[in-house]
Amino acid sequence: MILVLKNACVVDPLQGIDCELMDICIDVSLGRVVPCDRIPTKGNVKIIDLEGRLTMAGGIDIHAHVAGPKINIARLMRPEDHYRTNIPAGDTYRASCGVTTQTVIRTGHRYAQLGYTLVCEAASPPLKTRHTHEELDDMPIVDKLVYILMDSTWLGLDYIVEGEIEKLAAYVSWLLKATKGYTIKLVDPGADIAWFYGNGIGLDIDDQIPEYGLTPREIIAAYCKVAQLLNLPHGVHIHTNKLGIPGNYRTLLETFRTGEASSFQDRLVMHVTHVQFSGYKGDCWYNIEPASEEIVKELEKSPHVSIDLGQVTFGNTTTMTADAPFEFVLYHLSKWKAVLHDIEAETATGIVPYTYRKSSYVNCVQWAIGLEIALMLRRDDLWRIVLSTDHPNAGPFTRYPLIISWLMSRKAREELLKKLNQRAVRKMILPSIDRELDFYDIAVITRAAPARILGLQEERGTLKPGAIADVAVYDIKPRELDPSKEPDKVRKALSRAWLLIKSGHVVVKEGKIVQEISGETLYVDAKVREDLYKEVVNEIKKKFKTYYSVTYKSFYIKSYEIHKLKNITVVSKIT
Ligand SMILES: [Zn+2]
């Protein structure tokens, strides 16, 4: 069957299309977009007239904590997040609940309702990734992938200490295969180990990591080199050192510079995540200020770096990160409940509920940073930034439409600025910024840029013929509506897609889930020289016997354990 979406107002930056009225044709059995000039006039053709509604490729969330042990612990910790939010099953969907610690079913539903079709789980400890995949498998509709935590993993650190970069690359190749992961994730490199030895809080990029004689900068540089050697489609995904600590913007800028030194200069080397949490000037909570200007300047001269925002929204949420030392700090600030958890030989984790308040000086400064960066960057550089809240850390992903309304409307920002802590407002650049993003810019930071940054731009983030038929239609007509004047209409329309097509199937109609299908899980298979690979696997097996509580065999996740696994094979430079 061919599905024809007539009179779509298409915004597709990867094709340079900006609000053009056109038709989109989909081969339902292939699940792909096809050229409309080859559509037969007779036969099995279904036509939906979109009457000029906003139409974009499915959204891509490049960084969210949605599955695995951390979010599961958070669910146990926060019954208050669940008991008033239960949605009973309907004819076409399963029951679900949760707001900031949602069940995986609710996560799939809400992403689909926002028009999103690919979600990247931001951090999974290798040892716990089987659990992560089990949850991702159960998440309906969306496709997914997972980043694997390697910042404090002993096996990798040993190779860095020995200066064995090729062996480190073979180890990463093996680890991505063993865990069915997509790329290297570094969280506050070395901090968990330093914390283990009694001093991990605020470990800076050039501080020594106890026992290893290494610095975080050396870990970042080594993994950046490895990502380049392996030709990973997405560079190293980095949560910086000193995250969440006043004065940390210098560490962020130094992190950018570390990637440059390791770069082969032909592609993006590193993705620095939730920069808002790393964008603070000042030396204590009382005098922190946004470092947006410094970040924008450095970013403009760092073409090897992409970022996502980690935009703060106001209200209650649940923070969770492998940066356990920082969660220990946050627990003492929030004074309620926390879980801090060590994961043998690999990493750690922390979970703390938190409320961002409009009356709080610090929270208002945090709120300004993400928006200032997005609004001050040159338009061309928006291709290196992605909208995120580091779900649920700076707020649940369901608040993306609200953030978009702030980005598109000065009026929306001004209304909120009146209600914020005025000492913080005086420190912001935001009140003086006139710029308003348009739908093209929004499609860049929610579709085109994340697809390109993940190396998936040939078939995702775009509606060109051949692409996966992930199409989001919203009940607004960009040719008739001024988002600057009517931000609420934009927010409401983007909150519930009028139509979402996933791989050719209609899954959301007028904001309601009408079909639950299973998405794919993408992982990277990076091939390295066989003799090197075998040598490293033998060394890994010995270390498993010595250090791990599980065997090598049971650690390795087999392909058949994952419902719809899709491998992306890349040939490395180590052949
Ligand atoms: Zn995160």
Image (cartoon, helix red, strand yellow):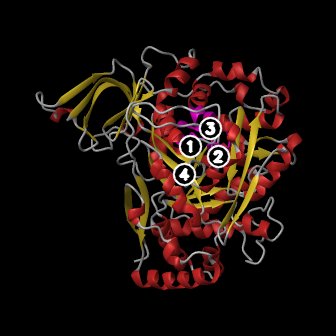
- Residue 2 visible in the displayed image: yes
Residue ID for mark 1: 103
Who comes first in sequence, dot 2 or dot 3? 2
**Which residue occupies the foreground of this view, 417 or 401?**
401
Which of the numbered marks, if any, corresponds to residue 121?
Answer: 4
- Asked whether the residues under the numbered discs 2 and 3 touch, taking CB atoms below 8 Å apart as contact, a structural biologist would say no
Q: How far apart in space, not on screen, are marks 4 and 1 (Cα)?
A: 14 Å
Who comes first in sequence, dot 1 or dot 3? 1
Q: Does the magenta stretch include residue 313?
A: no
Residue ID for mark 3: 396
Who comes first in sequence, dot 4 or dot 3? 4
- Disc 2 residue type? Arg
Label 3 residue SS = loop
- Asked whether the residues under the numbered discs 1 and 2 touch, taking CB atoms below 8 Å apart as contact, a structural biologist would say yes
Which mark lies nearer to you, 1 or 3?
1
- Asked whether the residues under the numbered discs 2 and 4 touch, taking CB atoms below 8 Å apart as contact, a structural biologist would say no
Who comes first in sequence, dot 1 or dot 2? 2
Who comes first in sequence, dot 4 or dot 1? 1
Is the CB atom of the residue marked by disc 1 within 8 angstroms of ligand 1's nearest atom?
Answer: no
Label 1 residue SS = loop
Q: How far apart in space, not on screen, are marks 1 and 3 (Cα)?
A: 13 Å
Give the quadrant of residue 210: bottom right
Q: Is residue 391 magenta?
A: yes
**Which residue occupies the foreground of this view, 199 or 440?**
199
Give the quadrant of residue 385: top right
- Residue 384 visible in the displayed image: no
Q: Residue at x 79, y 64 (%)?
A: 200
| Span shown in magenta | 375-400
Label 4 residue SS = strand
